[in-house]
Image: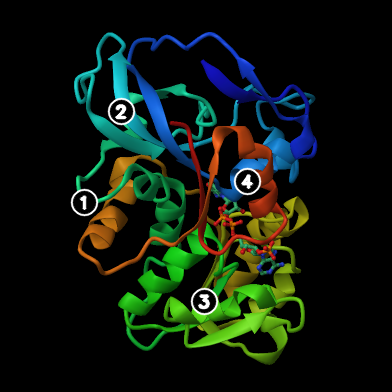
Amino acid sequence: MKAVVYERYGRPDVLRVEDVPTPTPAAGQVLVEVAATSINLSDWECLRGSPFYARLGGLRAPARPTLGSDIAGRVEAVGTGVTRFQPGDEVYGDNLRLKGGFAQYAVAHESALGLKPAELTLAEASAIPQAGAIALQGTAGAANGHRVLINGGGGGSGSFAIQLAKALGAHVTGVDNGGKLEFMRSLGADEVIDYRRDDFTRDHAPYDLILDLVAHRSVFAYHRALARGGRYRCVGGSVPALLSVLTIGAAAGLVTGRRLGVLAVKEGPRYFEPLTEMCVAGNVSIHIDRTFGLDEVPQALAYVGEGHALGKVVVTSR
Ligand SMILES: NC(=O)c1ccc[n+]([C@@H]2O[C@H](COP(=O)([O-])OP(=O)(O)OC[C@H]3O[C@@H](n4cnc5c(N)ncnc54)[C@H](OP(=O)(O)O)[C@@H]3O)[C@@H](O)[C@H]2O)c1
């Protein structure tokens, strides 16, 4: 089968398209003929080997030869013990542990996958799992009248998070680069901030809930941006920023009535299917900015990693 492989961390030009053996599903695994794989920032981070947490499991060289977590496709074969799927089923899910989506076939644990609803295309379904789970868990607790800020609101998780927070009745501020401000407005953001020109922790605060998809500031800045009783959650960013939120942020929060923490996102269909239901019902929209072919994975990753993508980008394998 055709797969996009890499042996060392680096820029997109370390990726090559090669013929490799089709994987065999082990017990509890499903072999999926991949139709579409959406790109997440985690793919870019695992390509670059940066931030440092992207090297967990592969300090010097990538642990998995093929990237691609958010897969959608047709079940080709199942390993022993698989009970929920059979060949021919259309499935989708976040294969973050095994990856391998930038290929014609990928193996995934049965527990990572859900059945694709007929109302969504395979490309649309591939856009949901990782970003949807982050957005749902990241906006949990937002309520009518809350001031909610989504830092990185113009990307994959952010575009869902803005819509979810609006649906809960919050007053939503989206922060991203200047080229994504109109897009965030179109998703329902009440206010938008260009992070290259403005510091949301100084000029616009305070907020009741901040979901930070790309934490790079000091923990004191995040603390300053929170209203009393407010909550700051980050899911990714620089290692120093994440470590300081985990340590100083948690301690400072205890004495000042503000909660700061790193969200360890729970994976699996029960964590993304609620968003799928909202998409099927027409209450949340899936914005696919661009679609690339399997041969164009380097360009697709660069498009996301270098800051051009509005919402999601999808690689199609068929
Ligand atoms: N905690 C967990 O368990 C877990 C699990 C999976 C993923 N993650 C993390 O979750 C995050 C999800 O990202 P995603 O896939 O939604 O990414 P994405 O689609 O790339 O969106 C990120 C957005 O943030 C913007 N951005 C970059 N730097 C910024 C800054 N300093 N201030 C404000 N916005 C900025 C980007 O725009 P530019 O174009 O300007 O760069 C982009 O629009 C990643 O950090 C990933 O590592 C965490």
Residue on which the image places disc 1: 119
Could you say which is closer to the camera, residue 25 or residue 181? 181
Residue on which the image places disc 2: 74
Query: Does residue 53 appear left or right of residue 78 in this picture?
Result: right
Please report contact status of discs 1 and 2: CB closer than 8 Å, yes or no.
Answer: no
> Which callout, 4 or 3, points at the residue further toward the start of the chain?
3
Q: Mark 3 belongs to which amino acid?
A: Met
**Secondary structure beneath disc 3?**
helix
Residue on which the image places disc 3: 184
Residue at 26%, 33% in the rendered image: 90
Q: Mark 1 belongs to which amino acid?
A: Glu
Q: Mark 4 belongs to which amino acid?
A: Ala
Front label number (4 vs 3) = 4
311 in relation to 123, above or below: below
| Residue 162 placement: quadrant | bottom left
Residue on which the image places disc 4: 300
**Secondary structure beneath disc 4?**
helix
**Secondary structure beneath disc 2?**
strand
Marks 1 and 2, how far apart in space?
16 Å
Q: Position of residue 129 (x, y in %)?
A: 40, 46
Could you say which is closer to the camera, residue 313 or residue 82? 313
**Secondary structure beneath disc 1?**
loop
Q: Residues within 10 Å of mark 3 (few under 14, many from 20)?
A: many
Please report contact status of discs 4 and 3: CB closer than 8 Å, yes or no.
Answer: no
Q: Position of residue 122 (x, y in %)?
A: 34, 42
> Which callout, 1 or 2, points at the residue further toward the start of the chain?
2
| Residue 16 placement: quadrant | top right
Q: Residues within 10 Å of mark 1 (few under 14, many from 20)?
A: few
